[in-house]
Amino acid sequence: MLASSIASYEKFGYSPAVRAGGLLFIAGQIGRRPDGGIGSVAEQAELALKRTAEILHLAGLTMADLVEVVSYHVDIETNLKEFMAVKARYTVKPFPAWSIIGVQALASPGLKIEIRSIAVFPD
């Protein structure tokens, strides 16, 4: 994990992921750059999905182990197409259940996307 990401988890008092039984619950991932900057919708989606993949890797899982994903989108009508193009590069079969929800705002100004996930450990 990026050192800046670890510092954020400590600062705000939460874990990037928690295992409960055979499930891994991944906290909402955002697309903030390591320097704190916020880029385009595509860049935010790329960073959030890369962080999700990295957390899965650290737990011994892959994107194929995701069973549920919820993504939150500011200005969904404007930004969904750009997000979907990035999402298509990360999703693999069997595809997870995925809910795409439009919201008015996220935790920091400029953020357009947040993605939280649940993965299952193989039997």
Image (cartoon, helix red, strand yellow):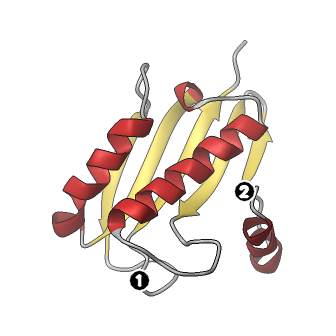
Residue occupying the point 42% across, 63% down: 43
Residue occupying the point 32% across, 78% down: 104
Instruction: State the residue lying farthest toward the left.
Output: 77
Q: Is residue 38 left or right of residue 59?
A: left
In which quadrant is the N terminus drawn? Answer: bottom right
Residue 57 at x, y percent in the picture: 71, 36
Q: Is residue 51 above or below residue 92?
A: below
Which mark is on residue 110? 1
Residue under label 2, please give it. Answer: 16
Q: Determine the image quadrant of residue 15.
A: bottom right
Q: Relative to the observer, which residue lies in front, 87 or 118?
A: 87
Instruction: Count the labels in the image.
Output: 2
Q: Is residue 94 above or below residue 44?
A: above
Q: Is residue 113 above or below residue 20?
A: below
Q: Relative to the observer, which residue lies in front, 73 or 39?
A: 39
Residue 61 at x, y percent in the picture: 68, 29
Label located before the other in sequence (2 or 1) = 2
Label 2 Cα crowd, 10 Å radius (few <14 / some 14-19 / many 20+): many
Q: Relative to the observer, which residue lies in front, 113 or 25?
A: 113
Residue 39 at x, y percent in the picture: 42, 74
Q: Is residue 76 left or right of residue 123?
A: left
